[in-house]
Amino acid sequence: MLTLGNYLTPTLLGGKNSQWFTEQIYTQFITRFNWEQGAAFGFLLLGLSTAIVWAGLKLSGQKFGEVMQKT
């Protein structure tokens, strides 16, 4: 979960011309000053990552409350 919002690692691995999703968010906010598009990409990343975690929990037969109690 922590690596979904990571910016530095994809930049180092992909170089200047890579098109990772986190780089697109960074570009929209910092380079283009397009806060609306950057915020939309951020919420899309949040929604997709939530859906992936939810699907993984459902496929494994676990419940979120049970997982949180084990930590």
Image: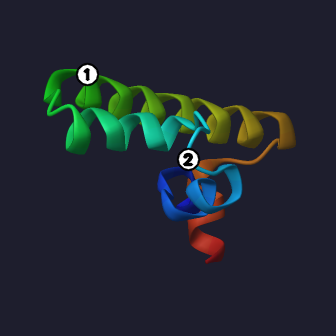
Instruction: Name the residue type under label 1.
Output: Gln
Residue occupying the far right of the picture: 60
In the rendered view, how is the structure colored? rainbow
At x 64%, y 60%, the residue is 66
Quadrant location of the N terminus in the rendered image: bottom right
| 4 sits left or right of 28 in the view | right
Residue 69, given in percent of the width and then of the height, sits at 58, 71
At x 34%, y 44%, the residue is 26
Residue 62, given in percent of the width and then of the height, sits at 75, 48
At x 47%, y 43%, the residue is 22
Residue 43, given in percent of the width and then of the height, sits at 34, 30
* Circle 1 Cα neighbour tier, 10 Å, few/some/many (<14 / 14–19 / ≥20): some
Disc 1 secondary structure class: helix
Determine the image quadrant of residue 71: bottom right
| 27 sits left or right of 36 in the view | right
Query: In this orientation, which residue lies closer to the viewer: 50 or 15?
Result: 15
Location of residue 14 with respect to 71 vertically, above or below = above
Instruction: Name the residue type under label 2.
Output: Lys
State which tag comes first along the sequence, 2 or 1: 2
Residue that carries the numbered disc 1 in the rendered image = 37
Which label is found at residue 51? none
Residue that carries the numbered disc 2 in the rendered image = 16
Residue 5, given in percent of the width and then of the height, sits at 47, 53
Determine the image quadrant of residue 17: top right
Residue occupying the far front of the picture: 16
Determine the image quadrant of residue 39: top left
